Amino acid sequence: MKKIIYTLLIALAGFGATSCDDFFDLKPSNEMVLDEFWTSESDVLSMVGSCYRSMQEPGFMERLLVWGELRSDNVILGTANNGNLIDIANLNLLPSNGFTYWGDFYNVINLCNTVEYYAPIAFERDPNFTRGQLNGYIAEVKGIRAYCYYTLVRAFRDIPFITEPVIDDTQTFQVAQSDPEEILRFLINDLKAVEAQAVTSWSNESYTKGRVTQNCIRALIADMSLWLGEYQDCITYCNKIMTDANAPLSLAPSNVFNQSVFIDGNSTESIFELQFLRSNIPNYIVCEYFGTAGGRSGAAHEVFRAYDFSTTELFSLTDIRGYDFFFPSKSGVYPIKKFVSYRTDITTELVNEGKYTNLDAAAGNTNWMIYRLADVYLMKAEAMVELGTDLQGAFDLVCRTYDRANPEAGPGSLSNEAVGSQQAMRKLVFDERQREFLFEGKRYFDIIRLINRDRAQFSSIVNEYLVPKYTTLDQATVTSKLSEYDALFMPIRDAELKANLLLKQNPFYEVSSDIDINK
């Protein structure tokens, strides 16, 4: 909590930085008295900028990748020299592991809470600060807060839920965990209440794609509704995005898909992505985890490598995602190329590393994708399948991303045999999400959502999607570590349990014989 307060004081010192060039770069170095700060609209803008800036921090970004990818069937460890990562990869996750630290997310949440609480004070003090601007800022930080809480719920499940700002250390820090479904329902209703107030788009493209807009809020509502099994709400909000004439979206064409979406950034299909620029705020974590250059001094590179998909039937021979997102090498290593490399030579022939343009010279410039139009299509398709009323419509949505990724096969190349079975369509949508969002921090959460939908299938789902990557480990240990639903979620950090006595440990880590929460 003291770190949260410190982050708040640092953010307050960055007031007045409101230009396009520095909005996403706020990292001030001085402290300021809170009462002297909230005097104008520019103060609110600078604090909102600090929310985004805190999301660009390596600790925040690192957890998006580790929580959403490392425990999934998308990646294995590459050259990792981090013991915490090695422990997770070896199913030796303990409450002392550094990746159980959630403070980077609560720092952002607290900044959002602070804006919501104090922005109306600045509105009263600044005669040029309009009600519409105020409402837009409030909608923006509520969207950021919802994304952070949604990520924490999916990673930890049982978390403290706080909507008031933590300003000084006189406040009580003893906060119990809240029911995760109640948290998400609150967030959904919260976002629905401000949807109409959110900005539709900005004149600056990096703002439209890099700040929370109305369509980002709709995507969050759809995503959380899908998690909760509220499928009609998911479809409704996906439809709002797909039919929004004020902020039209379109899939990037096949021949520029990889470069346009993941390298150049802010593409025609982007809804919300974190903005990075090597000269100011490099994307260190993508450089280190996926790339070969551009990371922090002394950091390992290619920390993650792709799982060996040649052992599966996930990608067809014509699917460019099976070539552009990663490639096989002669040594049997599968480097990840998404976000860090691209090729303009679109071909279905087996390619080698010489076909790629690596971003060594500009490493760190690539943005991080959170929502894009492909998400909307596949969220809606999944919801339609679960309702079971329009399997053909769901199939047609899957074809939009599949056809884009299979240009040589041509439109309609995806077999429609799955349309006759709800279970087969579930499998089709699930696989297409893996193909499309490979290495984007979504896969592990997709697996949990699949299990949530049918807990009776827990063992079969775990055995199909999680167990196979651990073939080098003792299989009795693998079975033990993945035998319970609680084990899918992160443990509460041991230091948090000592500082906040109202917190309760994830039951799996309480009863495991190799866990000592008092260590």
Image (cartoon, rainbow, N blue to C red):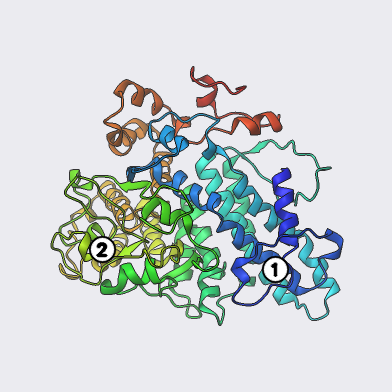
Which quadrant is home to the C terminus? top right
Badge 1 crowding class, 10 Å Cα cut-off, few under 14, some 14 to 19, many 20 or more, is many
Let me know if residue 147 appears in the view.
yes
Q: Which residue is mark 1?
A: 46
Taking depth in this image into account, of 324 and 77 the one nearest to the observer is 77
User: Which residue is drawn at the image coordinates 23% and 45% (left, top)?
Assistant: 308
Residues 50 and 78: in front is: 78
Q: Quadrant of residue 178?
A: top right
Rendering coords of residue 472 (x, y %): 27, 30
Q: Is residue 337 left or right of residue 446?
A: left
Q: Which residue is mark 2?
A: 402
Left-right relation of 256 to 195: left
Q: Position of residue 419 (x, y in %)?
A: 23, 56
**Secondary element at image label 1:** helix
Dividing the picture into quadrants, the one containing residue 463 is: top left
Q: Amino acid at mark 1?
A: Ser
Indicate which disc, 1 or 2, sits on the residue closer to the N terminus. 1
Q: Which mark is residue 235?
A: none
In the image, what residue occupies the spot 65% across and 34% down?
Answer: 496
From this view, report whether residue 154 is shown above or below residue 482: below
Q: Nearer the viewer, mark 1 or mark 2?
A: 1
Relative to residue 193, is residue 129 drawn left or right? right
Image quadrant occupied by the N terminus? top right
Residue 307 percent across, percent down from the top left? 28, 45
Q: Is residue 191 visible?
A: no
